Amino acid sequence: MPNWFFQDPWWLILIKVVALFVILLVWTIFNVWYERRLVGKMQHRLGPIMNGPFGLGQALADGAKLLVKEDFRPKKADKVIFNLAPVLTAVAAFTCWTVIPFGGKVTMFGVETHLQVTDLPVAAVFILATASIGIYGIVLAGWAGNSTYSFLGSIRSTAQMISYEISMGLAMVGVFLMSGTMSTHEIVESQRETVSFFIPFINQEINFGLPAGTRCCCSRRSSST
């Protein structure tokens, strides 16, 4: 297991964390804008297409609306858990990205480092475990609302996400066997010496990609409802 991930100075780690947070937020904003513009063309909706250059005016208006929106909470809801649930899911989602490599070795402010916050000997398993923690946020949100319908909806979403995780986890086993490690950095580096994992494990790519995509869609649909 490489040691350089744990030798970065604290200020460099802080820069990496802030940069990762900003990149993910900008990426999310771009994805939302692109999806709304694409769907808007399919549905002939003028707002996401013609409101400002490239439909950016609609996105800015929606963002301003969310900032001044009333903080509504059901009357008999558990206040602490109701507010904690989305935070738990968001923290789990951001934490998964800390062990994902974005590039090789670079020099930042005179210090050699890798474009990755950190790495672990079991980083791939860490991603699956941390993502599973986000499921608790869905269950807690449905339970804290003190409503049978919201609780049943959260249980349904949880069952779907757990079933997707099973196939996603099994699809990663072949990668572990071929690379001989669970470190995300070493998995990427191992592909320099062997055939790209996409060729021998193309069926597992499908088994991983479909559940992952479906899970993201279900997560967004659950959060919107």
Image: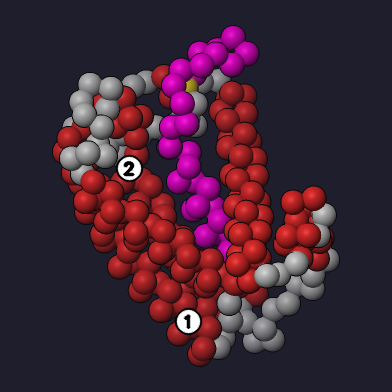
Residue at 65%, 40% in the rendered image: 22
Residue position for label 1: 153
Image coordinates for residue 67, horizontal then vertical, percent: 79, 62
Q: Residue at x 17, y 35 (%)?
A: 178
Please name the residue shown 46% across and 69% down the image. Answer: 218
Q: Secondary structure at mark 2?
A: helix
48 relative position to 155: left or right? right
Quadrant in which residue 223 is drawn:
bottom right
| Type of amino acid under label 1 | Gly
Which element type, helix, strand or loop, lies under badge 1?
Answer: helix
What residue did someone put label 2 on? 124
Residue drawn at the location 65% of the way across and 87% of the way down = 76
Q: Work out whether residue 181 or residue 75 is closer to the camera in this orientation and state it.
A: 181
**Image-based side of 56 in relation to 127, left or right:** right
Give the class, few, some or many, for how many residues have Cα within 10 Å of label 1's Cα (few <14, many ≥20). Answer: some
* On screen, residue 130 above or below 36: above
Q: Position of residue 129 (x, y in %)?
A: 36, 53
Nearer the observer, 10 or 161: 161
Q: Alpha-carbon neighbours of circle 2 within 10 Å: few (<14), some, or many (≥20)?
A: many
Question: Are the residues tagged 2 and 1 within 8 Å (C-beta)?
Answer: no
Residue 63 colored in magenta in the image: no
Magenta-highlighted residues:
86-113
Q: How is this picture coloured?
A: secondary structure
**The magenta stretch spans residue 106:** yes
* Cα distance between the residues tagged 2 and 1: 29 Å
Which label's residue is closer to the chain start, 2 or 1?
2
Answer yes or no: is residue 65 visible.
yes
